[in-house]
Amino acid sequence: MLAELLAGYPTYRTYLGDEREDAADRARIARAAQAAIAARPDLDRDLVGFLEAALAFEMPTAESMELAHAAQQVSGPIVAKGDEDTLLYRQVRLLARCEVGSDPARFAVDPDEAHAGFAAGRARALIATATHDTKRGEDVRARLAVLSELPGPWRDATARWRARAEPGWGDTAPDRIFEYTMWQALLGSWPLAQDRAQQFAEKATREARLRTSWRRPDPAYEAARRAWLAAVYADAALTAEIAALAAELQPHGDRNSLAQLLIKLTAPGVPDLYQGSELRSDALVDPDNRRPVDLGARARQLRELASLGAAPAAAAQVAGDLGAAKLWTIQRALGLRRRAPALWGAPYRALAASGPHARRVFAFARGEDLITVVPRLGVHAEGWRDTTLALGAGTWRDVLSGREIAGGVQPVADLWRSLPIALLLRVAA
């Protein structure tokens, strides 16, 4: 029965006990109890209720307290293995959302909810978009998210690729879940060396535990899987199609990456830059995301960027290179944060765009003098036709491009003339 309860935990662990009360944690334990009963109607409900109270530190006995503390230590590995290391390798509808901390039952978060979450953020809370545990680098996820805007072409492409690559399985029954995982992994990280792809393939299939596993590897299946992937790489026409679709996704994915980065740098909290993510990160799951980072190359590129100056032409010069654009954005946004930290202590306020593509604009202010404006769902944005954002009175300067912009209603396409994102600072009332 305790196993059923722990299987229903929605988070790694709760933090009740030692006179700490948390309504959200208490509700999580209650949901776990409800899930246990739903999964096993034959369970003794009184006993489930007793265990629920014990795990919530509501039973004042030494034995129940010991049980509650032990459950807090055990629940983390159970949730990690069940959700992150199994479920997220099976439910692979869109790999961009198969990530640590995600809820597989939710496909996306709408802008209003995102704004509310940022507004409630604590000043010292960590804002991370990649860690040593993420399944894919932040830029891989940003590119894969574009597939949600191109369902027709994506469906047609995977149907063609599946049929073309099927002979690579030989006498082994094809593994369609793995195939669909692999098509996405290739697209998101392309160009991807075959040895890295094979390493990812082994981990993905062993974690899924559908045809093989770490504890009981199936040599025949794994040989067939390696042969199938090798055949994909050996098919020049097929890899050309993968490369072509990756190239089609790239500008939209790069735009997503920069939008995500600027939000992280300017929303309430402390932005965390995982090793290597200062430039484009094509990493897959560990150990791929723990490869050595060339810090010297990053230092050299920072010096090169510093030599460009702050003119709009300099921002346009880095716009075509995601790595350079990320480093440029980090340098200039954090530079402003260092010079004017009070701007980041100001309240968060959502801003609404106007026009036919208003829903494709995500904007917010920090107080009255700093505005972040980024795009979302930009594949069908028609150049942001007739879509505007109202700025406060005065003169604004885009911190990223150096351009000065008048207050009042401005076309978002003009705000994004140099880079597909803007960080606006009021410089004159």
Image (cartoon, rainbow, N blue to C red):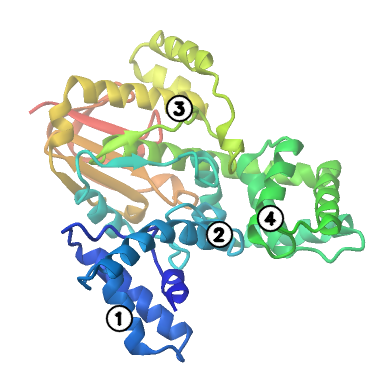
Residue 381 in the image: above or below residue 423: below
Residue 278's tag is: 3
Name the mark nearer the viewer: 3 or 4: 4
Residue 413 in the image: above or below residue 317: below
Is 424 left or right of 249, judged from the image as shown?
left
Q: If you read the primary sequence from the N terminus, does the residue marked by circle 1 or circle 3 appear first? A: 1
Tell me where residue 22 sits by quadrant: bottom left
- Say few, some or many: other residues with alpha carbon within 10 Å of mark 2 (under 14 / 14 to 19 / 20 or more): many
Q: Which residue is mark 2?
A: 88
- Name the amino acid type tagged 2: Leu
Mark 2–mark 3 CB contact (< 8 Å): no
How far apart are the two marked residues, 2 and 3, measured between alpha carbons? 26 Å
Query: What secondary structure is marked by label 4?
Result: helix
Residue 417 in the image: above or below residue 203: above
Residue 294, position as x, y percentages in the image: 55, 19
Mark 2–mark 4 CB contact (< 8 Å): no
Residue 125, position as x, y percentages in the image: 25, 42
Q: Which residue is mark 1?
A: 50
